[in-house]
Amino acid sequence: MKKDIRSFGYDELKTEMEHMGEKPFRSKQIYEWLHVKLADRFEEMTNLSLKLRERLEAEYIILPVQMEERQISKLDGTNKFLFRLHDGNMIESVLMKYKHGNSVCISSQAGCRMGCAFCASTIGGLKRNLAPSEMLGQIYQIQKITGERVSNVVVMGTGEPLDNYDNFVKFVRMLTDEHGLHISQRNVTVSTCGIVPNMLRLADEGFQITLALSLHGSTQEKRRRLMPVANKYDLSEVLAACDSYFAKTGRRVTFEYSLVHGVNDRDEDARELTAVLKPRNCHLNLIPVNPVREREFVRPSRENALNFKNKLEKSGINVTIRREMGSDIDGACGQLRRRYAEEEDSMDRI
Ligand code: SAH
């Protein structure tokens, strides 16, 4: 098996190259080709000798993240990408253009095993974890394809990043390393459904990234109905882990709450949610649920969503409604990958 060269951190690559008998500056050059110049093939690395390039080729692989499809929103310029991995697994990523810079939403796993009731990404289960290079590769390809510089990264695509903990942590280190794209940690957000032990570990990594918790229910019982992971970790434990993250990092936690009509958008829900968030220095992001074909969840009207927001705001909660991007393309939450999987399924049946 060839080694995944783009997943070696800066110091690790140095050690690798030393073992090959190469001078330290070679490792620096290779790292720059991989993480700054974003080369996808060893033959592009023209300041290396042909002999070294051939040795690299024989022992290492630059894992491909190959664009299969690209959709561009006419409404807001949002770009959606479907990428094919070396083993045929498909993942999707999104580029969103804001006034303050370009933000990319990446996937952390092919599929997901968390089983949240309203989410399209979990329907086919977990295929596998992504390597650090495959998380980086989504951002690198988007920069190369669009010529846009990425300044913000959100790990909110397919998969549960804290279910792929080691690779995710390594990805953050490499993404924010001064020898690579050097994106500021403050511009990186990770979203989790609430895997408590790994939230606690993350708080000790010394990162300055933003933690977003997918809350979706204001009580243990309501959360449990939407998110199977709540059977494992009680709401009180999840909230304590958020508090610990804030205490250790000084980073205000974001709570995400997908508004589902008639399920979690009633007066009672707003009251309970206020009680949960009021004592905390946090931010609440409301996401009117994106209907998923296989699921029956209904999105609240704009008016209902605004009402809900106003109620929380009046109680002093810091709240925004997530602006909807790319709604004219397979915009939301795993829909592009899902459509692709369905087409494959229907082809299998023919
Ligand atoms: N596994 C991580 C990150 C991926 S999902 C997590 O659970 O946080 C990113 C966010 O989108 C989560 O808050 C998730 O619950 C939400 N989401 C998933 N499907 C959705 C849908 N159909 N409509 C609205 N939000 C959805």
Image (spheres, rainbow, N blue to C red):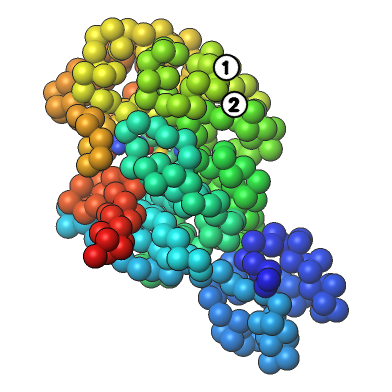
Left or right, 154 with reference to 49: left
**Residue position for label 2:** 196
Q: Whole-percent x and y of residue 189? A: 49, 40
Q: CA distance from mark 2 to mark 1?
A: 7 Å
Determine if residue 105 is in view.
yes
Q: Whole-percent x and y of residue 35? A: 59, 66
In the foreground, 119 or 287: 119
Q: Amino acid at mark 1?
A: Glu
Q: Whole-percent x and y of residue 319? A: 34, 23
**Residue position for label 1:** 237
Residue occupying image coordinates x 43% and y 69%: 66
Quadrant of ligand 1 in image: top left
Left or right, 148 with reference to 54: left
Decide: is 177 above or below 63: above
- Give the crowd class for mark 2: few <14, some 14-19, many >=20 residues within 10 Å: many
Of mark 2 and mark 1, the one earlier in the sequence is 2
Q: Secondary structure at mark 2?
A: helix
Residue occupying image coordinates x 57% and y 17%: 237
Task: Give residue 174's mark.
Answer: none
